[in-house]
Image: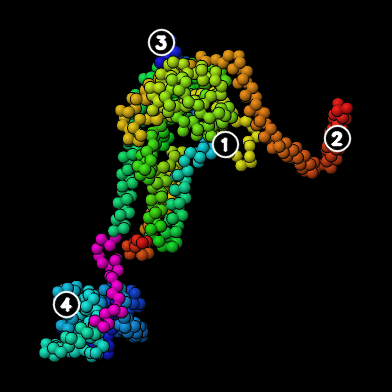
Amino acid sequence: MSTNSMSDPRRPNKVLRYKPPPSESNPALDDPTPDYMNLLGMIFSMCGLMLKLKWCAWVAVYCSFISFANSRSSEDTKQMMSSFMLSISAVVMSYLQNPQPMTPPW
Amino acid sequence: MGQGHRELPERPPAERRPDQARASPEQFRPRAVTSSSQQPPPASSCPGAGRRGAQARTGRTLCAMKTLPAFCVVLLVLWSVSEAKFDDFEDEEDIVEYDDNDFAEFEDVTEDPAPESPQRVVTTEDDEDEATVELEGQSENQEGDFEDADAPEGDTENEPYDDEEFEGYEDKPDTTSSKNKDPITIVDVPAHLQNSWESYYLEILMVTGLLAYIMNYIIGKNKNSRLAQAWFNTHRELLESNFTLVGDDGTNKEATSTGKLNQENEHIYNLWCSGRVCCEGMLIQLRFLKRQDLLNVLARMMRPVSDQVQIKVTMNDEDMDTYVFAVGTRKALVRLQKEMQDLSEFCSDKPKSGAKYGLPDSLAILSEMGEVTEGMMDAKMVHFLTHYADKIESVHFSDQFSGPKIMQEEGQPLKLPETKRTLLFTFNVPGLGNTYPKDMEALLPLMNMVIYSIDKARKFRLNREGKQKADKNRARVEENFLKLTHVQRQEAAQSRREEKKRAEKERIMNEEDPEKQRRLEEAALRREQKKLEKKQMKMKQIKVKAM
């Protein structure tokens, strides 16, 4: 357990504060999933809006959800929210322009 | 059935577009039909139609005069379109208009419209005293029959028909219909006009998928949170007896224990402990699986992975001697040897089996020198490693720890990375993903091992030979590094000198006072001359030495 059971190993005078590890390239190195998913979501929602493809818009919604689930706490929520809103708007616009249900690609 | 106003010689019997379908009854009214795509409201599309009495009447006539040409154009268009359409039934419309008299003669000729019971919706507009509009759902036979029947019988009958008249006709439509059935392509009613939710099945599927994802997110997040809390509750006592500060997120002004985990992510929890002999501090990271991400959950079904607990103890410089040592599963050690800067430089041999020291076969050892292994593998350590071998991923002690190898774009970094004396432990949580909060109790002995290791590292000292070897190793590594970066460093120094010269020249140029300029230039020239002289002297000295 401790060095010897009699003395207390604790040293209040030797307390060091927690320093968060410097966020150089480590966050990106650790797990690039949220960034990729964010980018992918934006691309799909733009495709869905421009090319009027419903499935693109739905995939964009999924991508933004996945990005949110994998996000690090240090990441900006604004970025997340903006990609989410963009994908939702892509879906809504696709259906407003063409209310027909989605046809499966096969 | 009412005849209605027959203002047209021929009315297109098959109107496919719903908007046109709605628009055509209105054609007979003196109303402003601006475009066929619009659906004029039943009451008043004309601006004057809303007024009452005489005003309304005058308004209406005015409207009629204005809209008459448009009305004619629309009729023409409709007629031509319907002619084209009537040739082959390839349209998608289901809402059609018929004057029932047009098809009265065909109604009994069709073979099985009755058993199929086509959807007939008779809509009559209340204030209309004209032709009734029939909306019929299209069935194959009907369409075929209509097309066939139209050709031989072009004119419409105004009177109700006699059964006897059509006795001979029963075969004819059959044969013709059978002949002409092939080229007919019946198109399905477009889905969004069907008024049924079933046609939107893909959308419903998507939304269900999203809901499932959200549910999994909530469940996964909660599970991770419960596991983290269970771990902390189990280990709290041990940690608090060993460290003054348990739990710190670095934001408080004073160094007080927060007494709780620091949540970095939905699946990563940190805990910083400090205030003990020998070590600066200990960072514990609970790296759980991404239970909140459904994709990850599905991927894990293919390839099971464990939750991990990573502990990093930063030692004081005086409390640890200089050595690099690692023990763990063979796979983990191979990976670490490739990734970690210190292991790759100091432990060049392959991981050796630890059977000599009584370790199970699953564990291997990487060491800088044999003496370190001998010193580290004392009885208690072996006991820990043997008993909890399934939970140990890797144990790494190093005085030259600087993290994983950094790949820089320019090649080698110019400086040796900063090193810190560190003890690293990676433990696997039992359960291989299917972990329960009570499994966290199994990790408590491992924390005991960590505490023991801290004290052991402090006590363990290399003997003289070992120390010499260690120093030689470190000097060798440094030299290698310097050699590799020699060229880069020279280039860097050269560029720095050029920068300085340029900066000085700029300063001289920017001096407004011409006198000062001249003086600065002279000073720069003198410095250059001195440098040249120095170089010449050096060259002479070298030549003399060589001789």
Query: Image point 34% across, 62% down: which residue?
Result: A103
Q: Quadrant of the C terminus of chain B?
A: top right
Magenta region, residue range: B178-200
The image position of residue B254, as x and y in percent, is 46, 23
Calculate the distance from the C-alpha at mark 2 to the C-alpha at mark 4.
Answer: 113 Å
Judged by depth in the image, the label closer to the viewer, 4 or 3, is 4
Q: Chain of mark 2?
A: B
For disc 3, the marked residue is A5
Would you call the spot at circle 2 few (<14 residues within 10 Å), some (14-19), or many (20 or more)? few
Residue nearest the observer in this picture, B71 or A75:
A75
Q: Secondary structure at mark 2?
A: helix
Relative image position of residue B256 (x, y in whole percent): 43, 22
* Chain bearing mark 3: A
Residue B197 inside the magenta-drawn segment: yes
- Nearer the observer: mark 2 or 4; the answer is 4
Looking at the image, is mark 2 or mark 1 nearer the viewer? 1
Query: Which of the two marks, 3 or 1, is nearer to us in this view?
Result: 1
- The residue that label 4 is drawn on is B112
Query: On the image, which quarter does residue B309 sit in?
Result: top left
Q: Which mark is residue B532?
A: 2
Kind of residue at badge 1? Ile
Residue at 34%, 32% in the rendered image? B431
